[in-house]
Amino acid sequence: MSLAFAVSGVLQSYLERYLGQPFMVAQEPMRLWMAIVAAHGVLVVIGVVLIVKHLLTLKPMPAGTAGDLAGS
């Protein structure tokens, strides 16, 4: 996501400052990078939902298995 933001920022600076394009004209080529940012955002939200679901549905360990995890 950070890389997509960086690429879109460099692209916008190049189009607006070097080529002298107006803001709205320079936004058109950046649609791809903003779509990539949105897709990564959706993946992050899905990951957060899965982690929260997992944490809320934890079950206690059966008796006698805690010692196995401690290495004794």
Image: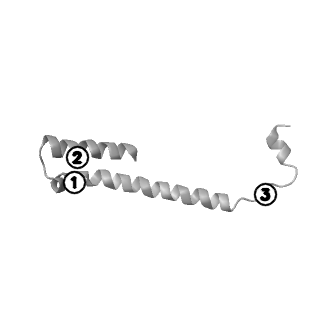
> What amino acid does circle 3 point to?
Pro
> What amino acid does circle 2 point to?
Gln
SS for dot 1: helix
Mark 1 residue crowding within 10 angstroms, few (<14) / some (14–19) / many (20+):
some
1 and 3 marks in contact (CB < 8 Å): no
Q: At which x and y percent is residue 16?
A: 17, 46
**Distance CA(mark 3)–CA(mark 2):** 52 Å
Residue topped by disc 1:
27
Q: In the image, 60: left or right of 7?
A: right
Residue topped by disc 3:
60
Q: Which image quadrant for residue 58?
A: bottom right
With respect to residue 69, does 50 lie above or below?
Answer: below
2 and 1 marks in contact (CB < 8 Å): yes
Residue visible at 80% across and 54% down?
61
Residue visible at 44% across and 58% down?
42
Residue visible at 40% across and 55% down?
39
Q: Name which of mark 1 and mark 3 comes first in the sequence.
A: 1
SS for dot 2: helix
**Distance CA(mark 1)–CA(mark 3):** 52 Å
Q: In the image, 27: left or right of 20?
A: right
With respect to residue 54, does 69 lie above or below?
Answer: above
Mark 2 residue crowding within 10 angstroms, few (<14) / some (14–19) / many (20+):
many
Q: Name which of mark 3 and mark 2 comes first in the sequence.
A: 2
Residue topped by disc 2:
12
- Mark nearest the camera among 1 and 3 is 1
Give the quarter of the figure containing the C terminus. top right
